[in-house]
Amino acid sequence: MPIIVWVAFIAFILFCLALDLGVFHKKSEAPSLKSALSWTAVWVTVSLLFDAGVFYYVGKEAGMNYLAGYLVELSLSLDNIFVIAVIFSYFKVPPENQHRLLFYGILGAQVLRGVMIGAGTALVRRFDWTMYLFGALLVYTAWKMYSAGEEEVHPEDNPVLRLAKRFFRVTHEYHGDRFTVVKDGLTYLTPMALALVVVETSDVIFAVDSIPAIFGITTDPFIVFTSNVFAILGLRSLFFAL
């Protein structure tokens, strides 16, 4: 895919995110059910319109691969919703701050997944046997999910969270929707920042499962990346709807 198409797509996504946070959700408040359902419908519609564009400009095979990848990523990402709910409960994130936190969480997830997709594509193109490793990883993950049963999520056991608490000053009080606060000339991380750290690392863990799955459908990095992005974009509004 030409570089101009990549630039145009990323610019479009950044514009949508800026419009979302800067215009439609400028105030810190908990989204209503009606708003959450409306935004869920908007992102699904935009995702399908993009697929129509892929069908028309790239071809039927690419369009089918995008649709399959989008559905796979969306279904595998649904687990994120319940993990996010546990994280928010653990950190006692105020409802009016949850939208802003998820905004940055999803923005970071897109960047991290982009890096992982780029690395995965390079490996697949250089070493064909990498696909067998991805397949083995999916089988192993499936076995872990089957054998784990009703295993609970414990955000306090997150190793990155422990490192953050070890190397940074932390305050246990919320200061609106701020991620850092200055006290007596010293900078502290707020619970918002700690919750964001856990949300990001949790998404990376889920991406280790979902990205190899879509590589089983296509190895086209543009299709893999765009289907991932649109699946994640709709996840936030779906979280509030549920």
Image (cartoon, rainbow, N blue to C red):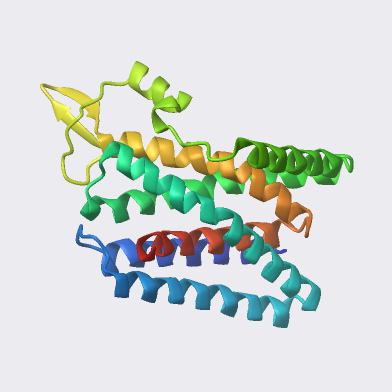
Q: In the displayed image of the protein, which residue is found farthest to the top?
A: 166
Residue 77 drawn above or below residue 201 = below
Q: How far across and down, in percent of the image, does residue 242 sit?
A: 39, 63
Q: Quadrant of residue 224?
A: bottom right
Q: How far across and down, in percent of the image, does residue 202 sit?
A: 50, 39
Identity of the residue drawn at 62% across and 58% down: 73
Task: Please state, as top left, top right, bottom left or bottom right, where the N terminus lies in the image.
Answer: bottom right
In the displayed structure image, the side of residue 44 where residue 239 appears, left or right: left
Identity of the residue drawn at 22% across and 46% down: 177
Q: Quadrant of residue 18?
A: bottom left
Residue 39 drawn above or below residue 137 = below
In the displayed structure image, the side of residue 207 where residue 81 appears, left or right: left
- In front of the other: 45 or 90: 90
Q: How far across and down, in percent of the image, does residue 121 sit?
A: 75, 47
Q: How far across and down, in percent of the image, does residue 65 sit?
A: 74, 68
Residue 10 drawn above or below residue 84 = below
Identity of the residue drawn at 56% across and 66% down: 8
